[in-house]
């Protein structure tokens, strides 16, 4: 009996094969490695990749050359003699105005700004997102809509009112003030991120916790927080790169001795006094770019997810 | 959540009290900063505030001064050139790269990492790198001249006529990776069967992209467009780092005008008027989109 069924399948298979043969080959042609298509495809991608890599390469190469070699010309040629002098100088000796203690000051200022800003903005936004997703109350959606529309308003429109508010509170120009500013402008996108994530969690969990008598904060800390670590990581990536790269708020809301790294970098490179030391400038630029680059290379796909969500921030 | 509200509570206000308390920062930001701050700035743009904001109304004087200022006109022109070109180029380049990446290629991750890394860098870093690469004495121009083409001239950062294109090159380098990523996500969202059907019908690949895939990706395109456009209006740090608005004021942009008048020239009224114009520009882009995107969905 088994034989008949085997036979049937075979026959069916044969039918299929013969009909396929009749209609010519189907499916993809086996690819050759060096087809015209592949050459064009990989060729274009490689050329594009070179364009994107070029500035990074130029930065690295320039920062490893001595000034005499830089003056000789070609920015693309690899250094004949590798020197780390420019890096040392950029970190510890480069001058902005009267201070000559290098970018290290800006680096530590940025760290001091970054850590509390990231923590506070994520804490505030995650709680807001949680309230919006699980504890709807009248009017909540309205505030949220204003928040999202606010993400599109140019910062320049809101900066001066914030200056006034901070001045009234007596924290204009302080670290606290800047942390508040970063929290404010991180809020739309982060709240959206957290709201959508919390809303996607199974609502039964929330209901079960409610029945067991858990309150607002208990559910947040005991259930939501432990379940949402990936989204917290995404938010962190978003905020670390965003806040580190910020320039406008740094310029407006800090004083010269607490300028973040980006502002100090710009002041060092674009200062009009003295001889331009391009190698030191490039070393300083690389140092400033290093933090977000490291975050980027370490986080991989999560970064893509973060910016896809955070692209609105512009 | 309304269903399990305990009955008999006398006051609506105390329902979900903790949630409301927790949302106070959000409400404050939405009302005081985003709504209040914006209205405040628009309101004060009709005054002649200088060093400090004062309620001395002068009607549309600030706007007349603004539009009579050559620096503002240059800023607007630059924004228009930069904006239109960067929209076109970043959409085209971003889509092309995404289409190439979607051909089931090898090393996709490596390519994506390379295309996207500039987006992790700040505009300051971007501006300073390209300032160096485009440096006429040492950069691309001198390298090509040293190869034998001695009359080659490509000096965007010191030529007022083309300086904005120098900024455009840097901006595209920084931002196209993101567009590529968004487009790639859009392409991946398209049903494989569409491709199969097109192949069965013998439609060439470029035609499939142009006539079927791109129309299907309309929502992705629109979202990307809005994202790029709202970024364009904000462009500030890049110009500050790359050219500081120079040579002369050939590469000024509106955001820089606002900052300079508010915090350096002590002419708040001008700054407010200019920033209100920026707001108007964004509104022209965002309002129709929001209407199509959200208003339409409710009805349909």
Image (spheres, rainbow, N blue to C red):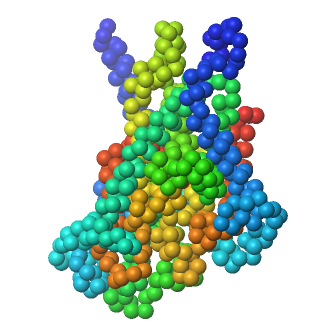
Q: Along the line of sight, which residue is nearer the eye, A10 or A85?
A: A85
Q: Residue at x 58, y 60 (%)?
A: B234
Q: Residue at x 47, y 52 (%)?
A: A174
Quadrant of the image occupied by residue A258: bottom left
Is residue A7 depicted above or below B248 in this figure? above
Q: Residue furthest right?
A: B59
Q: Along the line of sight, which residue is nearer the eye, B144 or B51?
A: B51
Quadrant of the image occupied by residue B1: top right
Q: Residue at x 55, y 29 (%)?
A: B22
Decide if residue B277 is in sight here. no
| Residue B82 percent location from the top left of the image | 59, 69
Q: How many marks?
A: 0
Q: Is residue B289 left or right of residue B241?
A: right
| Residue A306 percent location from the top left of the image | 45, 43
Q: Residue at x 69, y 7 (%)?
A: B8
Decide if residue A112 is in sight here. yes
Q: Along the line of sight, which residue is nearer the eye, B92 or B213?
A: B92
Q: Is residue B282 left or right of residue B161?
A: right
| Residue A33 percent location from the top left of the image | 30, 56
Is residue A147 depicted above or below A91 in this figure? above
Give the quarter of the figure containing the N terminus of chain A.
Answer: top left
Q: Along the line of sight, which residue is nearer the eye, B17 or B116?
A: B17
């Amino acid at each position: 009996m088994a034989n008949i069924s085997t036979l049937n399948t075979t026959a069916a298979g044969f039918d299929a094969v013969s009909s396929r043969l009749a209609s010519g080959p189907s499916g993809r042609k086996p690819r050759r490695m060096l087809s015209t298509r592949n050459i064009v495809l990989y060729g274009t991608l490689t050329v594009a990749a070179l364009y994107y890599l070029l500035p990074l390469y130029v930065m690295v190469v320039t920062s490893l050359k001595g000034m005499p070699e830089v003056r000789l010309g070609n920015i693309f040629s690899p250094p004949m003699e590798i020197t780390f002098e420019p890096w040392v100088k950029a970190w510890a000796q480069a001058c902005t105005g009267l201070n000559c203690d290098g970018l290290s000051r800006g680096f530590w200022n940025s760290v001091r700004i970054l850590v509390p800003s990231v923590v506070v903005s994520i804490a505030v936004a995650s709680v807001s997102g949680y309230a919006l997703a699980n504890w709807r109350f009248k009017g909540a959606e309205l505030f949220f809509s204003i928040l999202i529309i606010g993400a599109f308003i140019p910062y320049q429109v809101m900066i001066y009112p914030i200056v006034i508010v901070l001045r009234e509170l007596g924290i204009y120009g302080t670290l606290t003030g800047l942390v508040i500013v970063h929290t404010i402008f991180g809020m739309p996108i982060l709240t959206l991120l957290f709201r959508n994530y919390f809303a996607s969690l199974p609502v039964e969990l929330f209901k079960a916790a409610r029945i067991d008598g858990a309150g607002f904060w208990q559910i947040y800390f005991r259930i939501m927080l432990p379940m949402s670590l990936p989204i917290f990581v995404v938010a962190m990536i978003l905020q670390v790169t965003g806040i580190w790269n910020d320039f406008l708020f740094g310029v407006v809301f800090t004083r010269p001795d607490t300028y973040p790294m980006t502002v100090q970098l710009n002041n060092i490179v674009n200062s009009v006094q003295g001889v331009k030391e391009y190698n030191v400038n490039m070393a300083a630029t690389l140092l400033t770019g290093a933090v977000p680059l490291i975050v980027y290379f370490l986080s991989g796909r999560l970064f893509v997810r973060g910016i896809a969500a955070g692209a609105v921030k512009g | 959540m309304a269903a399990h509200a305990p009955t008999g509570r006398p006051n609506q206000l105390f329902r979900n009290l903790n949630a409301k308390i927790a949302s106070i920062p959000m409400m404050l930001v939405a009302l005081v900063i985003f709504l209040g701050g914006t209205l405040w700035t628009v309101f004060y743009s009709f005054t002649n505030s200088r060093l400090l904001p004062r309620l001395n109304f002068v009607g549309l004087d600030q706007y007349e001064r603004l539009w009579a200022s050559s620096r503002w006109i240059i800023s607007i022109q630059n924004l228009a050139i930069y904006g239109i070109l960067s929209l076109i180029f970043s959409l085209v380049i971003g889509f092309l790269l995404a289409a190439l990446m979607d051909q089931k290629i090898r090393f996709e991750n490596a390519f994506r990492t390379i295309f996207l890394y500039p987006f992790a860098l700040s505009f300051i870093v971007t501006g300073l790198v390209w300032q160096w690469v485009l440096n006429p004495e040492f950069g691309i121009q001198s390298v090509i001249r040293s190869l034998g083409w001695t009359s080659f001239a490509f000096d965007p950062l010191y030529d007022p006529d083309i300086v904005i294109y120098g900024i455009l090159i840097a901006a595209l380098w920084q931002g196209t990776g993101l567009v590529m990523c968004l487009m790639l996500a859009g392409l991946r969202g398209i049903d494989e069967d569409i491709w199969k059907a097109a192949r069965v019908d013998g439609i060439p690949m470029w035609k499939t992209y142009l006539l079927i895939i791109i129309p299907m990706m309309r929502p992705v395109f629109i979202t990307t467009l809005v994202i790029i456009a709202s970024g364009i209006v904000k462009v500030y740090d890049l110009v500050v780092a790359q050219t500081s608005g120079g040579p002369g004021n050939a590469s000024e942009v509106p955001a820089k005008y606002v900052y300079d008048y508010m915090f350096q020239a002590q002419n708040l009224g001008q700054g407010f008027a200019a920033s209100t114009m920026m707001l108007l520009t964004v509104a022209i882009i965002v309002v129709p989109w929001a209407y199509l995107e959200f208003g339409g969905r409710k009805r349909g």
